[in-house]
Image (spheres, rainbow, N blue to C red):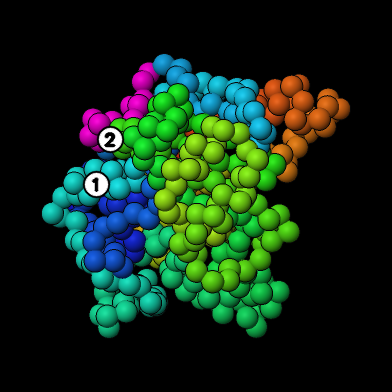
Amino acid sequence: MPGKTLRIAICGGGIGGLTLALVLQKFSKKDIKVDLYEAKDKFAEIGAGLNVWKRTWCIIQVLGLEKSMGEMAVHPPVEEPTPSFTFRRSDLPEGYEFHQIVSPYGTASMHRADMLKVLTDNLSEDIGTHFEKRLVSYVQDGSGIVTVSFADGTTAEADILVGADGLKSVTREVFYEHLANDAKGRDESEAQHLQKFIQPTWTGMYAYRTLVDSEKLLKIAPDNQAPKKAFLHFGKSGYVVAYPISKGRFVNFVSLVTHPEKEGSRLEGPLVKEVPVDELKRYFEGWEPHMQQLLSCVESCSRWTVCQNRDIPYYASGHVALLGDAAHAMAPSLGAGAGQAMEDAYVLGRLLAHDNVTVENVRNALDIYDIVRKPIASKVADLSRMCGNSYNFHYVPDSIKEAGVEVESPEGLKLLCDFIYSAWSFNWTGTPEDEWAQAEKMLNSAHGMMS
């Protein structure tokens, strides 16, 4: 392609950043240079399990990774409606199952480290990878060139900076500091509004994460089904998600407890902290034997402060874009956080790789990315928030209120399941190709007007 080489710097080597690199690698047929900067000394994911739904699996297929990714999953997706999560009321002396979600493709559960390995194994040598590069700041000059500064004193230049650096994104901090400073003097209320998005806020939710050894569990409870299928345990004091990963060798165990009065407060202390197992267990005293069996096998656990970026106004500004948790950190209650990061990467990568995008007009591509992705990711974040509050009966859908029944009654639980299914259906309705089609149409229209 005639013209300058398009230089793209990706800060953050997690699932979102790596997916973006692979999309650029696959679709770009022009002169493009991609550099991936990771703060750690190697690619590594925090957390254990994740679920891959149909929407996300479509991206995996487009990238040609379905075979290797399928080998990592406990139950690889199939082209037919498949049981995914079993709903269980567990905060009683005798628990009971009350619903089974059946969805197209089901859900493929896997260890985050396994997904990361598949992604990194498929990076070509053309992608520059740089470790121990912790972003501390960046500046944009009048021509659009972004100069990135790292903690080790080095710098790098790029035409585009993509912040895929997670919840505590330095890219987002600088991004919104710049926007707020630009607004000062012009509109003080706008400046104060923009400052709210420099840091994420607390959802009021803690997530206790651990892995349960399946062999150990089955020794004490041979009939426990957690090593074989996915459960969502409902209860007033919290809820628990448990599903097999690593081919069933472990059960990914995540318990979430909510302090609604704390939602929207600022972060205090570390995001992740190792805590005594007894701190986890006290929330689930009196819960059914099925849950006590799982808890008895917990040897250690970490407490995660679940944060969010609600109603963030911009994903892109100038020659800088935000991706994944840096843009739209959300509660894990819909199992869509990693998938949304991959959708960001797919749409942004296809735009940047497009033949009509050059160094001179690349800002248009970032604006289109912002327009296409922001409403979708915001919708998912809202759905996730409502779902999480419904699993512990803190949120009662309108359908239950209108029926005049208690949420915990048989009819109430049925209506609750209908609400949850409707929310979850996002994960298998439509594909990221729909978003790309919209983005490409906008890109071609803008190119036609400039020609």
285 and 428: which is toward the camera? 285
Along the horizontal axis of the image, is 130 left or right of 420?
left
**Does 205 appear above or below 180?**
above
Amino acid type at image mark 1:
Lys
Q: Local crowd at mark 1 within 10 Å, few (<14), some, or many (≥20)?
A: some
Along the horizontal axis of the image, is 246 left or right of 87?
left
Residue 71 part of the magenta segment: yes
Residue occupied by mark 1? 117
444 and 223: which is toward the camera? 223
Name the outermost residue toward the left: 125
Residue 351: x %, y % from top left: 36, 48
Residue found 33% across the figure and 27% down from its top: 76
For mark 1, give the secondary structure. helix
Residue 233: x %, y % from top left: 58, 35
Give the residues in magenta: 64-79
Name the outermost residue toward the right: 404
Residue occupied by mark 2? 72
Residue found 53% across the figure and 76% down from its top: 177
Using the numbered discs, state the Cα–Cα distance from disc 1 to disc 2 in whole angstroms: 10 Å
Amino acid type at image mark 2:
Met
Residue found 50% across the figure and 54% down from its top: 277
Residue found 36% across the figure and 20% down from its top: 78
Residue 157: x %, y % from top left: 27, 73
Q: Quadrant of residue 156?
A: bottom left
Comes first in the chain, label 1 or label 2: 2
